[in-house]
Amino acid sequence: MENNKWYRTDLVDETEEFINHKTAEERETLRESTGIKVLEEERGRVKITRVDVDSSGAEEIGKKEGTYFTFTVPTLTPDDEEGFKQLGEVLAEELTTLHPFIKDNKEGKVLIIGLGNKTITPDAVGPLAIDELQNSATSIQERCIIYAPGVTGQTGYETSSFIKALAEQIKPALVIVVDALATRASNRLCKTIQMTDTGIHPGSGVGNMRKEISKETIGCPVTAIGLPTVVDGPVLIADAVDTLFQSIAAKIQEKNSPSSALSVTPWRPSDTSKVDLEVIKPIFGEWSTWPKEERLQLFEESLVGHDRLFVTPKNIDEWVHNYAYLISDTLTEWIEST
């Protein structure tokens, strides 16, 4: 099957080239051959992935040259105060990693921009974070300019033009842009933050790409902080089918196991890496053994000509408000400490 790469994602560690190199050895090969360096660690419950991309790596994976961080808490829930606290702490630490020069430039202004449409909940995290900063962050008002420009559909003007005009007047030492993102993995919805020093293409994850906001277009360093709040519809189908195939194959393999016979609750495999999908080929056919990415592409191809469907969690209101508080508090504490 020809790989058309039609899925939508804003997260660098979900690009095709990245996910096809899953082990440490494979990622070392990726680094040596394409100019991509991957470092992974855990701090408490937060899984941190740092991806450094040089010019050759940028061409390979279709992402800009620069540094990308993703911070993930896989078990995060909207009422998980400790999980959000740890995310905020890691975000602040890595902001300093990206921008050590801010400590030596205490007179330099920081322009904080909240992108998105406040009337559409999955897209409202940027404007809501700005609201929180304006309402509570009086201690950083002298050093920061805080602004939510709206979206092009509301104003009739490119968002990047507003930001560039502000930057030309303010001449900030740093621009921080907060926005909602799209993911290609339903289990990462609202559980991941991506931060990068490469700037951002607003709307790119949902196929509505606007003009880039970056150092090249604005004239000063730009850091983008994004939260994945939507997932492409076919991804959910692929995830559901993959879970179904894994569960049926595991049950077939375990049908004579005493643990399976004694189970009194709905049973699901605990380690899908050991499941052999060949056992379900006689039931579902050849496509059941395809890699998940190829099945996803099948669903994408089947929906060509139809309106694209993007899905968000039913409790997205809670998620978005929690992240607005987290980003506001983290940026306030970080600015105060520099």
Image (cartoon, rainbow, N blue to C red):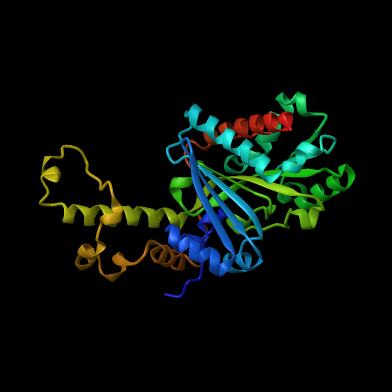
The foreground one among 94 and 177 is 94
Residue 38 in which image quadrant: bottom right
Percent coordinates x, y for residue 97 in the rendering: 66, 43
Please state the horizontal and vertical placement of residue 155, each as a whole percent of the image. 77, 47
* Residue 71 quadrant: top right
Q: Which residue corresponds to the image point at 49% horizontal and 28% vertical from the top-left?
A: 82
Is 222 placed above or below 208 here? above
Which one is nearer the viewer's eye here, 25 or 47? 25
Q: Can you see residue 276?
A: yes
Q: Who's the residue at 42% across and 53% down the image?
A: 236
Inspect this view and state whether residue 16 appears: no
- In this rendering, the answer to whether 296 lies above or below 98 is below
Q: Is residue 122 left or right of residue 296?
A: right
Q: Is residue 309 above or below residue 178?
A: below
Q: Position of residue 279 (x, y in %)?
A: 20, 63
Instruction: Answer with the quarter of the image where residue 89 lies.
Output: top right
User: Quick check: 285 left or right of 171?
Assistant: left
- Residue shown at the point (30%, 55%) measured from the top left: 273
The quadrant of the rendering that contains the N terminus is bottom left
Q: Quadrant of the C terminus?
A: top right
Q: What residue lies at 73% left-to-right and 28% top-to-bottom?
A: 336
Q: Is residue 313 above or below residue 294?
A: above
Of residue 96 and residue 255, the one placed in the foreground of this image is 96
